[in-house]
Each structure stands twice: as C-alpha cells, then as structure tokens.
Amino acid sequence: MSPSLLLIQGLSGLAHAMVLFLIASGLSLIFGVTRIVNFAHGSFYMLAAYLTYSFAAALPLGPASFYVAVVAAALATGLVGLVIEVGLLRRVYRAPELYQLLLTFALVLVIADVVRLGWGTENKTGPTAPGLAGSVRIAGQLFATYDLALIVLGPVVALVLWWLFYRTRWGVLIRAATQDREMVAVLGVDQARLFTSVFVLGSCLAGLGGALQVPRQALTNVMDTTIITEAFVVVVVGGMGSVPGAFLAAILIGVIDAFGVLLLPKASLVMIFVVMAVVLIARPWGLLGRPEAQARSAGGSVTAEARAIVPAPLVLALVAALVVVPPFLPRFHVLVLSEILIFALFAGSLHLLMGTGGMVSFGHAATFGLGAYGAALLLERARLPMLVAFALAPVVAAAGAALYGYFCVRLSSIYFAMLTLAFAQIAYAIVHQWYDVTGGDNGLLGVWPPRWLASPVRYYYLALVACAGGLALLAVIGRAPFGLTLRAARDHARRAEAVGIDVRRHQWAAFVVAGFFGGLAGAAFAFLKGSVFPNYLAVPMSVEPLVMVLLGGVQAFAGAAVGAAIYKVLDTVVTWYTDYWQLVIGLILVTLVVAFPRGVLGVLAERRRA
Amino acid sequence: MPEVVLAVDGVRKSFGGVHAVDGVSVALERGEIRALIGPNGAGKSTFFDILTGQLRADAGAVVFRGERISGLPPHAIWRRGISRTFQITATFGTLTVLENVQVARLSATGRSLELLRSAGHQEVGRSAELLAQVGLLEQADRLAGVLAYGDLKKLELAIALANDPALLLLDEPTAGMAPAERGALMALTAAIARERDLTVLFTEHDMDVVFSTADRVMVLHQGRVIADGTPAAVRADRQVQAVYLGDDL
Amino acid sequence: MLQLREVQAYYGRSHVLYGVSLEARLGEVVCLLGRNGAGKSTTLKSVMGLVDVTAGDIVFEGRSLREVPTHEITRRGVGFVPEDRRIFSDLSVRENLEVGARAGGAWTVERVCALFPKLASLDHQRGGSLSGGEQQMLTIARTLMTNPRLLLLDEPSEGLAPVIVRALADTILALKREGLTIVLSEQNVKFARRVADRAYIIEKGQIKFAGSLAALDADEGLRRAYLSV
C-alpha cells in the first residue's frame, strides 16, 4: 500500500473524527454536568441533518443557503434540546439514573418516527457545500475539499469550547458542577438554569455535527443509532465528562476506523469496539476520565422497601391459564404468547444482573444472540438433533458470557455498562462479517423444530416449559444463598469483601447464569422464528430487556415478566394499527417514566404500603 | 510467653506524598483488648484498611498467626480469621437484619455460591444466636437500612462475629451513640471477647470508653506510634497529652 | 436573625432531627456542640435545604426558608461551609472563588485575599493541591464571595493542626467584627470557648442545653454526658 494512500485514508479518518468530536463532546458535557446518559443525542444529530437538508432547499439565498441552513439546524436542535430538558428531563433529575436512561431512550423512538413521518424512509442526498464541493490533490491523491475544511473546523470548535470552559465564568461553573453539583448550589448558582444551558449547548453541538455531515453522506433513518454507538465509544474511551478526552478519543477512533476499513475490511466493524474494550481494561475510567467520587452502581437506588412479592396463588393461576388456554386461541395469539414468554425469560435473566446484582448491562443481547446462533449452528452446521441443539445453546451463551464477564466485572457503573455494550457489538460484528459461517446479513434460515413440534401450539408448550421453567429457576436462584450474596455485594461491596465474599467472582458467576438463561431465551426465539439474524445481537435487542425490566420495576423479579408482557403486548397492538409504533411506544414510555418513575410494580408496591 | 496473634512490622502507606501510615510496628497478644487512639487524620482507618487488605501497604509486613497476610485480598484475610467493623457503619441496607448476618454466615461456611436451595432457612439458628448476643433479635425482620444508628453498630458487630474470628478490628465502634449505650456496647464486646478468647483492636474517640475497656492503649500521631502501654502510662505520657488529650487549641 | 422551630429532618431515610429549636441573633457567634452523629451537620444542612425537613420551620430575617431552593437560600444571605470542605479540586484557587462571586457584592477576590493573604499567593494553584489548612481557608473564602450575612460553619477545626486551628479562631473572630452572624458546629469545646458567645448541645437530634459557655463550663456532668473527651 502506498504511503500517499495511507495519508489520504488518515486524513479522511480525521475528517470523520471531527464530526465525531462534535457529537461526543456534547454528549460528554451533558453527562459530566447532569449525569444523564443521553441516548437521544444521536437522534438530535439525525434530526439536524434532515433539517439542514430541508432548510437548504427552502432558503432562497443561493450558495449561502447551505451555510445558513447548517447554523439554523444547529440552533433549531438546541431549541429542541431546550424543550426536552425543561419539559421532561427536569422532572426526572432526582429519579434513579436508569429511569432517566429509559426516558432518553423513549425519545430516540419518538424522534426516529418523527423523522420518518416528516421525511419518509427513502435515503436522501443532501446538497454539497458550495465552494467546497471539489477535491484537492494531496501527495498525488484526490482528497475532498469539504473534508479538509472539516479538519480545520474541528480544532476551531475545540478551541472555542476550550475558551468557553477556561476563560468564562460559565465555564468555571460548568467545571465546578462536573465535580460537585450540590456545592455549586450551595454557592448560590441556580442548577436548573445551568443544566438547561449545558443541555442546550450539547444539543447544538450534536446538531452542528449532524448538519455538517449532510454533504458527506446520504441521509438515512438509521443515522441516529449508528452515530450514538460510535459517540458513546468516543466518550467512554476519552473518559465520561472530559471534553479534551473526547477530542483525543475522537481522533483515535476516527483514524482507527479509517485504517480498519483499509487493512482489515472483514473485521472493520469490530475494530473500534476492540479498541474500547482494550482501553477500558487498561484504564477503567477512560483516557482522561477520573474515578467517580463515590462509586455507586447504576442500580444503586434500588431499595428493598419496594420488594414487591407477587402472591403465589396469582402465579399459580397465571401458570394454569398459560397451560389451559392456548389451544383455544387463534394461531397468531399463540405466537405472540410464545414471544412474550421468551422475552419474559430474557428480561428475567437481565434482572439477575441489574436488579439482584446491581450491574446494568447494555449488551445483554450478546447472550440472546449467542443462544440463537448457537442453536442454529448446532442444528445446521453440526447437524445435531433440534432438542440437543436447543439444550446446548444456553451453554454456548454462558461460555460467551463467562469470557466477556471476566473483564466487565472489573469496572463499575457506566463504564461497566459500556464494556458490556462493546462486547455485544464485537459479537454482533463477528456474526455480521463472518459470512462463511453465519451467513452474515442473510442470517441462517430454516431453523425449525422437527415436524412433531412444529405447530404453533406444540412449540408454544416447549417454550412454556423452557421459559416458565427458566424463570422459576431464576426466582429460586434469586432467593438462594447466591442471590442473597449478590444483593449484599450490590448494597455494599466493601462490607461484602469484609465478610469474605469475593465480590468479583460472584458477579462473574451472575454473568454466567444470566448468560445461560439469556441464551435459552435466544434459542427458543430462533426456533420460534425459524431463522436467526445479526440484529438479534444488535443494540435494540439489548435495550428491549432493559426497558422491560425498568417498565416492570427493577426492585421485583416479577417486574421483569410484567414489563416484558406490557412491552410486547403494546408492541403487537400498536404495530397492528400503525406503522409508527415507535412513536406511540415512545410516547407511552415517556408518560410512564414521568408518571411512574419507579416502574409499575414499584409504584403498586408503594401504593399498597401507603 | 503469651502467643502473638498479629505482628505488624514497619508498615507504611502514603497518598500523594502524605505519609498516612509511616512505619508502624505492633504485636498483639492473644486475648488482649487494645485501643488505638489519635486525632482525626492520624492514620487509624488507613492502618485498619491495611490490616484487612482493603489497602495495600507500600512497605512492611503483616503476619497473622504465623502467616504473612499482607497483599492478600480482603475476603481471603477474613477467611483467615480477621474481621472488622467500619467507622461509617456499613451494612447491607436492603437486606433484613437477619439476612445481613446470614450472608456472613453463608460466606463463612462456603455456601455463598449455592444456587438452588432457598437461603431463607439456612444458618437461621446460628445467625439468630449472634443477633441475640448483641441484643437485636427482636428486630431480626426489619430492613437494615431503617435501623437506628446504635442498632446498626450492634448489627455490624454481629456480622463481624459471624466467622468466629480470632482478631476483631473495630473502627470507632461507639461513635454517635448515647453515653449509656456506649458503655453497654463496649462491655458487651469485652464480654464476648473474653468468652471467645478473642483479640480486639479498636479505635475510639471517647476516652471513657478507651480507658475503661482497653488492656493496653497505643497512640498514633501523623502516621507514627508515639506511645504504647497501659492506660495509666499512656494517660500520663507528656507527648500524648500534648497532641491529643491536652489543652492545646 | 435565624430561628429554627421544632425542626424534624431526615437524612436519606433515617430520622436525624427530632424537633430542634435554636436561634442566632444578629452579630453573635453561636456554637452547636455534640458528638459525631448527634445531628450537628444535619441541623446546618437543614437550614440550607440540603436535607429533607418534614416538620417545623426555619426562619431567616423574618422569612421562612422551607421549600426554598438551596441557591436561593444562599442568595438571601446564608453562607454554608461544609465539613468536608469540598473544594473543586480541578479548579484553580481563583476559579474556586469565582464560583461564588456575586456582581456588586461587598466581598471581592481582593478583599478575601486580604483576609487570607496565603490565598493570594496560591492564586493559580489547583484546589486539589492545597494542604488541609489552605483548603479550609479557601472554602471559607469561597463562601464569603457569596456575601453572606449569616455564616454556617460545619466542624471547621476538624482535622487541622493546632497552629492552624488557632489561626482559624482568629479568622472567625475577625469575621464577627465585620458584622457577620456565625453558627458553627464543633466537637472541640476549647475551640468553642475561644470563639462563641453562646452554645447549644445537641444529642440524638435534640437540643439538650442552651446557654453561655460559662454555664456549660460550670456543669461538669453536662459536659461528661454529652461531649467527647
């Protein structure tokens, strides 16, 4: 490979890095001050890109239209951020972190459908930047002028941010609040206004990133999810809350990404996550981050006051109904019911980690996907009988969980969550790119149970046995010495260490157990659908069980099943009536979080006590 | 010669240039109750954290019953028979009082990884016994998170006793308790220690408690031991008076 | 100037104050004595709205502070210096001071530096690199920048070397001469004796004694019962 080609590739990596920096700096800033992990940040980016597209087309300013549109879109995104912060986030700053997360995730869904409603689902090609449309010759190679402009613009924005932070009173307040919010209030600073200003600035930066991306790529409906994962990687690698860290990490990730495509095209998707995993294992708080003042697990606000125990007769009645009723239901309902059972188990397995263990995983899809692919590969490639494949798949998932769990339990709170995400993304990338074995994008088809089990009702009973059995086992484990010990370690890790508990070892074991049951759910799902696809390991599949657990209430194990049922029923019903199910579900979630900030069961338990 | 349970030799620990513990050597004899006193910031909690493995010393050795334990993780040290309480009470807030002790008992008996048997009925008798000993049995079913301060201190003691330790480290066991409660708790602790032939090392700010409970008193000041002897001798020590008890402002 | 009436307060879920009543009059230094965990800090924090007050009232200059946001309490003229100092360790000394600065206030960076000459020489040092005594100065100076008329100091002498404690006492007396009303919590009776006009003893969230330090000195039993050494 010629040196000039390498140079060009490096430069285009840098250009991408600058856009990444804009997004990630806003995300990091918002987290640093408000402690909100804003999933919707990528949605702001996407929204701004579409706004730029429309503004540029509508403005009658000739060549200047594009540039005015960029600024207008960034400001408009800031305005959207303002409305969201004042209208919604302000109500949940005191709620457990996880519910804030649920809220921003709901916004992702809403904004995604707003974009679909406004601009349709077809890709759009935006305008080029007037005056910067051509290319220049660098070392004998052509390089886009626009990209060169971005490489100049990035450091300029970084300098402006530096000036804001280090040369203005506002910046002093921001840096102070990043360290100790309460003390800033004690010194007479109105936190609410400070938070709003930070959120608006962060949103503007995301908007600017999105606007500037328009000439570089076609606009699509999935821009939000692709950028948010990359931005999270940058923020985490740089250190949460550190803007200089974000700058450094953006360059690292952008350049590695560029060379990855060139050098290891087959593994390009994996590269940045491998980098993130390596950085986090070596530096648990990112490159320029620092340890949290008090290490508190993301599930730390869980209290056993709200231990909602569902009465046994109710459970028995439910199980009886699940056994007796299905043969009398229409085929479609039986399929939905099977799916609810599978997701109840999937969410239940996550609950062991996040409820009982206080470890919030953003990558639980890995276990589901490993189970599903394990089952499919054992059936199709190893030619094992279906029931054997079904039984072995959870073991595959548990082995995978043991591998990545070993590293994850060394980190805490948000970094832990991010490392789980990284491993899930690595698994996703492997499945997606290892075409010969996994079929890549096409997935694996024909993963059906044998004929005697193939009817929806018969398969339903297999799913019922596997999932209800799995849930029962998880319930038992939660109350066994192991579950009690995990809860103790969650409540007070230092105290637990001081009564002879090897906290990491127990957390690791929890990973393996959760992996097993997540894998069981995945295997059951594979045979229900008759096929497996890479999206079984993708981010939305990690978010779904998270939403289910939170929806039901993280305090109670039964919450996972309740949440799964509510979510899946909503999903099914809404999809029936509209194409815009994300919008409806998102709005419902927003309402639920604002009305039930502790999950449905948590609130019910509180009512009962009152 | 009485048996030396714990021998500490030249232990040092500094944080960013500040010597928190600066060459401490101590020998604790079996069955003795030793107080460790000193002003705030003298290095007492750091010293405890080193003994229990929560911090790693920069230099020096800790030998417990003839075995070098410095460098071992906290859970391994606990298994060898050193148990502790924390200055800021540390219990499992969302567990019941009984479960708090059960967890420690299950750990002591090596069953904390058991998956399929309910924990509800395991180690109940032994745990209840410990709770009765510290006077918390009536509150067994309450959540630790809602206990009164004094009761949390008692619960900590019960948890610390769960592995039948040979050495008990108590970090300000009576801080924040009413005077009457303090005396009672320390008398109880001393009685348990004598009964079980336990060695106790405790830090304390209440001099009444120190001088009425301890067999020996050692004084830590700026990371160094400046006095070590009988309560009367330490009380009379000029240097100790100057840094700690004296009328300096 | 400040009046607490039958205040009940919770710290997290534990009930800490059981009907605390106390007052500070204009220009006096009042000391709240008691042991670790007796409720001293919680009392001061209840004034600042940093803990949940469930009953009773807190009145400052004739207006209730209950349900008032913390920053607003500060703006009304109450300054709080927390026990653990809570310096912004990444910020320079000057930036620490700027966080509390009010335009047009009587206290400026120059004026606090006149009171604490040491701080002027540390201007660009990171807060985190200061010694304990310097941090204590900075945290008081930082609070003065908010122009308080009432200053709440939570265990100011804790963990400081004797020489520094003596200097701190002089500072508090100087602030009193400036016309500030001061409420401080302490475990160190000797320190209280040196700076305070009146004292309260708090124990288990209730006021057990209110009166002059002379009266406290006269009562050996009281001191033995409620105070440390």
Image (tube, coloured by chain):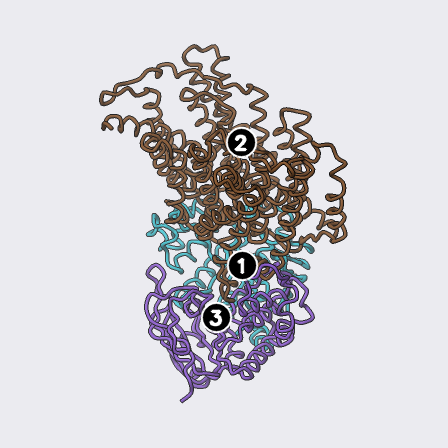
Chain colours: A brown, B purple, C cyan
Q: Relative to residue B160, is residue C109 drawn left or right?
A: left
For the point 36% across and 76% down, the residue is B25
Q: According to the image, label 1 marks what residue?
A: A489
Image: B141 above or below A418: below
Query: Callout 1: few (<14), some (14-19), or many (20+) C-alpha neighbours within 10 Å?
Result: many
Name the amino acid, label 1.
Answer: Ala
Residue B138 is situated, as x and y percent measured from the top left of the image, at 69, 70
| Mark 2 or mark 1, whichever is nearer to me | 2
Res. B46 in view: yes
Q: According to the image, label 2 marks what residue?
A: A445
| Mark 2 or mark 3, whichever is nearer to me | 2
Name the amino acid, label 2.
Answer: Leu
Instruction: Give the mark nearer the N terminus: 2 vs 1.
Output: 2
Q: According to the image, label 3 marks what residue?
A: B79
Q: Chain of mark 1?
A: A
For marks 1 and 3, give the CA distance. Answer: 17 Å
Q: Quadrant of residue B191?
A: bottom right
Image: A232 above or below B237: above
Q: Quadrant of residue B232?
A: bottom left
Question: Do tags 2 and 1 sit on the same chain?
Answer: yes
Residue A154 is situated, as x and y percent measured from the top left of the image, at 36, 29
For marks 2 and 1, give the CA distance. Answer: 43 Å
Depth check, front residue: A2 or A101: A2
Instruction: Give the SS element for disc 3.
Output: helix
Question: Do tags 1 and 3 sit on the same chain?
Answer: no
